[in-house]
Image (cartoon, rainbow, N blue to C red):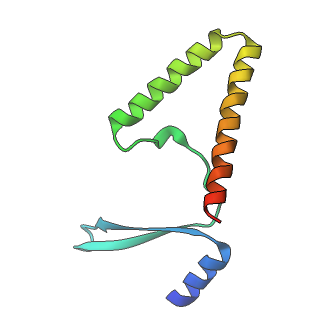
Amino acid sequence: MGKAIEEKILRERKAKTNKFFCLNYGILGAHTYGICLDFEELHNYRYLGDTFRERERIKLKSERWIRRLKTIPVLERQALLSAISDLDRTRAKNLSQECL
């Protein structure tokens, strides 16, 4: 399939593409590889952070917060989680208005 046709199909599907350079020792030299994701990205926060230490810090912080939230009474915990959810919704709404 021609490159122009491929790109047209990807635009119509609104697919996300990612290109990266890689050294390939089987075929000597650097090559460009492409990945096409034609689905909604799922949130996987395991890989959040650029380095091992950053990922570890985030993981430990998450574990600490979970431990603390387990000790809080249920209604108070639900109120806090609701406030956090409202914060995320407000932020998403503000971001979408900036894009207009």
Q: Please give the count of numbered marks on the rendered protein.
A: 0
Quadrant of residue 32 within the rendered picture: bottom left
Q: Is residue 94 above or below residue 64?
A: below
Q: Is residue 34 above or below residue 56?
A: below
Image coordinates of residue 6 in percent, x first then y, are 56, 83
Inspect this view and state whether residue 40 appears: no
Residue at (62, 16) in percent of width and height: 69
Residue at (72, 10) in percent of width and height: 73
Would residue 19 appear left or right of 84 to someone viewing this image?
Answer: left
Residue nearest the viewer, comparing 30 with 25: 30
Q: Is residue 25 above or below residue 67?
A: below
Residue nearest the viewer, comparing 88 with 34: 88
Inspect this view and state whether residue 47 appears: yes
Would residue 55 appear left or right of 76 to someone viewing this image?
Answer: left
Toward the right, the furthest residue is: 75
Residue at (34, 37) in percent of width and height: 52
Image coordinates of residue 82 in percent, x first then y, are 73, 29
Residue at (27, 69) in percent of width and height: 26
Image coordinates of residue 4 in percent, x first then y, are 53, 89
Residue nearest the viewer, comparing 25 with 64: 64
Image coordinates of residue 44 in percent, x first then y, are 56, 43
Q: Is residue 12 above or below residue 44?
A: below
Quadrant of residue 98 within the rendered picture: bottom right
Quadrant in which the N terminus is drawn: bottom right
Quadrant in which the C terminus is drawn: bottom right
